[in-house]
Image (cartoon, rainbow, N blue to C red):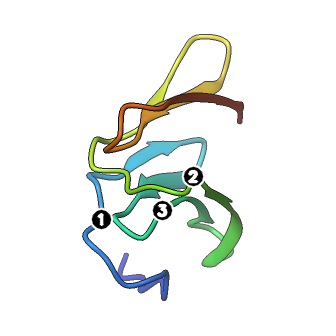
Amino acid sequence: MVFRHKGEVGVGTKPVIKDHILYYGNSSNFLYAIDLKKRREVWRFSTGSGIFAPPIIDEKNNILFITNVGNVYSIKR
């Protein structure tokens, strides 16, 4: 499948996919959730600083990620 998402300009992290939702962060301060079946953005989460490491989804469906300034986030999927 080929899909292009017009997120904010910036370097993106390696994507993580769970239940047809793709998650990735970028250097423009956002974590994105993209529905691959509908080919649209579900939501974006602003952190105020860049995200350079891929998010992790734990066994309770929390999305964990860290920003380039060391802030750690855990948000419900």
Q: Nearer the viewer, mark 1 or mark 3?
A: 3
Q: Residue at x 54, y 57 (%)?
A: 48
Residue located beneath label 2 in the image: 47
Query: Would you call the spot at circle 1 few (<14 residues within 10 Å), some (14-19), or many (20 or more)?
Result: many
Q: Is residue 1 above or below residue 21?
A: below
Q: Amino acid at mark 3?
A: Asn
Query: Would you call the spot at circle 3 few (<14 residues within 10 Å), some (14-19), or many (20 or more)?
Result: many
Q: Amino acid at mark 2?
A: Thr
Which of disc 3 and disc 1 is earlier in sequence?
1
Q: Please, what secondary structure does the residue beneath circle 3 have?
A: loop
Residue 44 is left or right of residue 71, and the answer is right
Most foreground residue, 15 or 38: 15
**Image quadrant assignment for residue 50:** bottom left
For the residues bearing labels 3 and 2, Cβ distance under 8 angstroms? yes
Q: Residue at x 39, y 42 (%)?
A: 67
Q: Is residue 28 above or below residue 56?
A: below
**Position of residue 11 measured from the top left corner of the image (x, y, whole percent):** 25, 70
**Position of residue 18 measured from the top left corner of the image (x, y, whole percent):** 53, 39
Inter-mark Cα distance, 3 to 2: 5 Å
**Position of residue 68 measured from the top left corner of the image (x, y, whole percent):** 31, 44
Please give the label number shown on residue 29: 3
Inter-mark Cα distance, 1 to 2: 14 Å
Q: Please, what secondary structure does the residue beneath circle 1 have?
A: loop
Query: Would you call the spot at circle 2 few (<14 residues within 10 Å), some (14-19), or many (20 or more)?
Result: some
Residue located beneath label 1 in the image: 12
